[in-house]
Amino acid sequence: MAEKSRSKTIPLLALFIGILCLYFPVKTTAAAALEADPAVDLLYLTLVWPGTFCYFGQCCKPTTSEAYPPANDFLIEEMKTMDQTGNIIQNCNETCRFSINVDPMPSLIPDLYSHWCNLTCPCNNGFSNWNNTWCTYGQCSQLNQTDFFMAVFNMTAKANLLEVFSANDIAPSSSTSYRLRDINTALMANLGLSTHIECVTVIDKTSVITLVSKINICISSDGQSFINCPFENPSKSCNREVFFPPFYINKLKDCDDDSVSSGGFIKMATEKHLAM
Ligand SMILES: *[C@@H]1O[C@H](CO)[C@@H](O)[C@H](O)[C@H]1NC(C)=O
Ligand SMILES: *[C@@H]1O[C@H](CO)[C@@H](O)[C@H](O)[C@H]1NC(C)=O
Ligand SMILES: *[C@@H]1O[C@H](CO)[C@@H](O)[C@H](O)[C@H]1NC(C)=O
Ligand SMILES: *[C@@H]1O[C@H](CO)[C@@H](O)[C@H](O)[C@H]1NC(C)=O
Ligand SMILES: *[C@@H]1O[C@H](CO)[C@@H](O)[C@H](O)[C@H]1NC(C)=O
């Protein structure tokens, strides 16, 4: 990127590049991502706050929630592979085999169901999310499937976001707002410059407010440590005051799935996974 001193030329240059992109729209990141041997410099773990994700009451109970209820905590969404500048590196291998029966995956099942569940409707067991994350990004990483998933869980536990917030008097609340600066200070003290916060904007009666929705965490490519994010937070979505709404597990919509009402769903879901 050009430096500030050359800023006068930037608008014209940007316009020129913009026009070029209009003429050659496909030749950008998608093409680059498919080139051989892309350099993955970091892992970008995305944790979602379910209180915000389900703020409008549109969430469904995972099909496995009776045995493994969703954690009242930040939930795992995915872990992307990126280069130094924050470009996503994906789809490195056309063939993909995600397997839940490679050791120690079976022992991760309770964690997968409770911490890596998907609360969108219709009710689902989260499997397609794990599969997509492995197939789209995991295969670009230097880790094998086992280590990739272990890294996701290990680093999520290490980040311990809810505890970090709670130790700084930041707790989910339907009435109190927090200063973004205080949240960043809490994250900074515990995780250094390795986090990027994201918010969503909602219209509450007449005012426009922002709710903390995701925390992204930069992790070394070997999955072992938090690193300073080498690029700026691409999201500028949080106001100076943000809300951190509670997550109400009992407000999740029930599923009208036969396998749930019969009570046989746990066995079925597990067996189905183990067979893959
Ligand atoms: C849940 O799954 C849907 C569909 O696969 C996906 O679009 C969404 O991002 C997932 N949500 C989370 C929180 O992982
Ligand atoms: C692509 O994935 C398949 C199946 O998982 C594997 O056998 C193969 O070695 C991979 N190819 C490369 C280039 O990594
Ligand atoms: C896993 O994801 C890949 C690519 O995203 C897809 O081709 C494949 O069908 C999925 N497998 C299962 C079992 O859903
Ligand atoms: C994954 O990689 C680690 C470290 O390289 C190795 O110890 C382990 O055996 C591998 N696991 C599988 C299932 O290939
Ligand atoms: C994850 O944590 C476990 C237990 O602390 C440890 O044995 C394992 O080596 C870690 N795995 C990775 C990939 O960091």
Image (cartoon, rainbow, N blue to C red):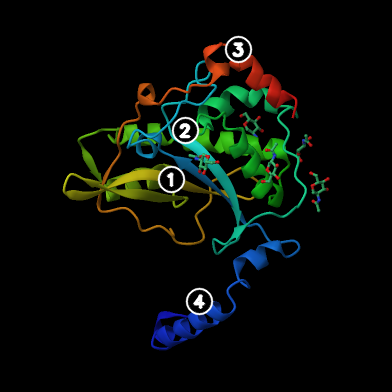
Q: How far, Cα to Cα, is label 2 from label 1?
A: 17 Å
The residue under label 4 is: 1
Q: How far, Cα to Cα, is label 1 from label 4?
A: 26 Å
**Residue plotted at (53% across, 21% down):** 257
- Beta carbon at label 2 within 8 Å of ligand 1: yes
Which amino acid, by three-letter code, is at mark 2?
Answer: Leu
Residue 91 lies left or right of residue 62; in this view the side is right
Which amino acid, by three-letter code, is at mark 3?
Answer: Gly
Q: Are marks 1 and 3 in contact (CB under 8 Å)?
A: no
Corner quadrant of residue 74? top left
Give the quadrant of the C terminus. top right
Which amino acid, by three-letter code, is at mark 4?
Answer: Met
The residue under label 2 is: 119
Q: Secondary structure at mark 1?
A: strand
Q: Secondary structure at mark 4?
A: loop
Badge 2: few (under 14), some or many (20 or more) residues near its Cα, within 10 Å?
A: many
Mark 2 or 1, which is nearer the eye?
Answer: 2
The tag on residue 188 is none
**Residue plotted at (64% across, 15% down):** 267
**Residue placed most toward the observer, 194 or 7:** 7
Residue 95 lies left or right of residue 193; in this view the side is right
Tell which circle, 2 or 3, labels the residue nearer the N-terminal end. 2
**Residue plotted at (56% across, 26% down):** 113
The residue under label 1 is: 215
- Beta carbon at label 4 within 8 Å of ligand 1: no
Badge 4: few (under 14), some or many (20 or more) residues near its Cα, within 10 Å?
A: few
Mark 3 or 4, which is nearer the eye?
Answer: 3
